[in-house]
Every structure is written in structure tokens, then in C-alpha cells.
Image (cartoon, rainbow, N blue to C red):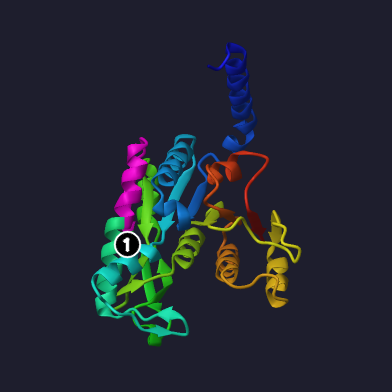
Amino acid sequence: MMKKRDMNRDWISTARTLSEALPYLQRYDEAIVVIKFGGHAMGDDTAMDTFARDVVLMRQVGVNPVIVHGGGPMINEMLDKLAIKSEFVNGKRVTDAATMEVVEMVLSGRVNKRIVQAINAQGGRAVGLSGKDAHLVTCEPADPALGLVGVPSVIDPGILHTLFRDDAIPVIAPLGAGRNGETYNINGDTMAGAIAAALKADRLLLLTDVDGVRDEGGNVITELKADQVREMTAIGTISGGMIPKTETALHAIEGGVRAVVILDGRVPNAPLLELFTDHGAGSMIRA
């Protein structure tokens, strides 16, 4: 059994942490923070609940969080169940009409509503939508060879501002509408970056399964400037799956986002560590 002295020490530590967080709480009051949610946390119930609690706490202290999620593994699982075979071009899945039906069903249905439910269970007011709702995201084809894969061309964030005023938390599936009414599948990171730029967000947090951008020695770099990212990419220090994330970061910053953080979503409370502590988390990229 814990001794009373130890309990008092824990409570004092908690109070000190809250006190030290005050400047950050003031700093982010009414700030818009876009979070790309994916990876390990999406498939783990405990991690999902922790993430949902963090998001509700952010809204409770005055932050306007926007969640953009992926769902690739869930899409693959459903395609396998339905015996829908996929073709690939340069390693990227071709999204035909049959595949698109499954993509929309999984992203707007199963995945989106699971996140909404988790946030609401923690006392939040989450609202699920996709880029097709209220003309939020209009798309152009990313590559005709890939079929119904799109890139955002026009973002109308009006519906998101309406939800902010209603104290609601938007949870957005990465789908958009074409100019002729087609439905397009959008890369989750690309979607998050485009939404963040349209909102001129204070922060874009890209939750991943790695702990940030590493230097040549394998050490995580806590803060980088855009020019450093370009140089590290040119010489191959930034490579593989990190390149699309840093490219998303650069595009978001060019679009008006103040800073982008690539951080490990497997770390409990990673968004809170980044926003409300001296320690921070992951790698921050600034202009």
C-alpha cells in the first residue's frame, strides 16, 4: 500500500506540472492544432482512449483541435475479405470504382466513427465528416494511372470554423470530391497538411510510428528549419517513408502553418507533451 508521504509527493508533482504548463495553456488559447492520426494508436484500444482523452483535454483548455485520420491497414483488410484484387503502379495502389467503394465505406464509416465515439466517450463533442462534406475539399487527380487518387486543389474551411464556434471537434476522413462529383481518395498526410494550411493552423502534428527526423548519427533532431530539411533530403539523410512527411511539412509551412511537428504517436500523451511542456516531442520544422 502506498504510504501517505508518497501520495502527497505524487500530488505535489502533479500540481507542479500543472503550474508549469500555465504559460503553454495561455500560449495555445484559441489556437488551431491539426493532428494527423494514424499508425499504431489507431489499432490499439488503450492508445485510442489515451489519444481521445488528450484531444478532449486540449479542447477543454481552449485549443481548437482538428483530427485528420488515415486507415490504410483497415482498407487492406476489407479488400482482402471481399476478394477485391488491387493493381499497383510504381508501388502505389490503383483506386478503381470498386476499390473506392470500399475505401469510402472504411474511412468514412468504420474508422471515422470509431475515433468520434472514442472522443465522445471521454466527454468531447466530436463530429465526423469527410472532405466531401460542405465542399470542404475539392480534388484534382493525382495521377491518371492511379485512378481515383486525388490531391486537394481547393479547401473551404467554413464548416470547420462553424464547428469551432459550437465547441465541437472535427474528425475528418481523407476523401474529397472532384469537380464532376467523383469521389477521390487522398493521402492522409497530404490531407492534413492541406487542411492545416487552409486554416493557417498554429501547429500541424504528424503522429507516426517513429520518434522524429534523425541526423546521420541516428539522433533525433528536435528542431529544424525548412532549408535544413531540403538539404538533408538532397544528401539522403532524410529518406524512405520520412520524405513524404517532411514534404507535407514543407508544403504546410509554405501555406501559412506556423510549425509542423513529426512525433511518435506510440508515446502516451505525445500531443500534450509537445504542446504543454518544455520537453516537447519529436522533430519541429519551422520556416
As helix, strand or loop, the secondary structure at mark 1 comes to helix
Residue 188 pos. (x, y %): 44, 64
Residue 211 pos. (x, y %): 61, 55
Amino acid type at mark 1: Leu
Residue under circle 1? 107
| Residue in the foreground of this view, choosing between 82 and 203 | 82
Asked if residue 41 lies left or right of residue 185, the reply is right
181 falls in the magenta region: no
**Extent of the magenta region:** 111-129
Residue 196 pos. (x, y %): 49, 58
Residue 150 pos. (x, y %): 39, 75
113 falls in the magenta region: yes
Asked if residue 164 lies left or right of residue 78, the reply is right
Res. 132 image quadrant: bottom left
Q: Residues within 10 Å of mark 1 (few under 14, many from 20)?
A: many
Q: Residue furthest bottom?
A: 145
Q: What residue lies at 39% left-to-right and 87% top-to-bottom?
A: 145
Residue 37 in sight from this viewpoint: no
| Residue in the foreground of this view, choosing between 107 and 199 | 107
| Residue in the foreground of this view, choosing between 83 and 285 | 83
Q: What residue lies at 33% left-to-right and 80% top-to-bottom?
A: 86
| Residue in the foreground of this view, choosing between 204 and 54 | 54
Q: Residue furthest front?
A: 1
Q: What residue lies at 60% left-to-right and 45% top-to-bottom?
A: 274
Asked if residue 225 lies left or right of residue 48, the reply is right
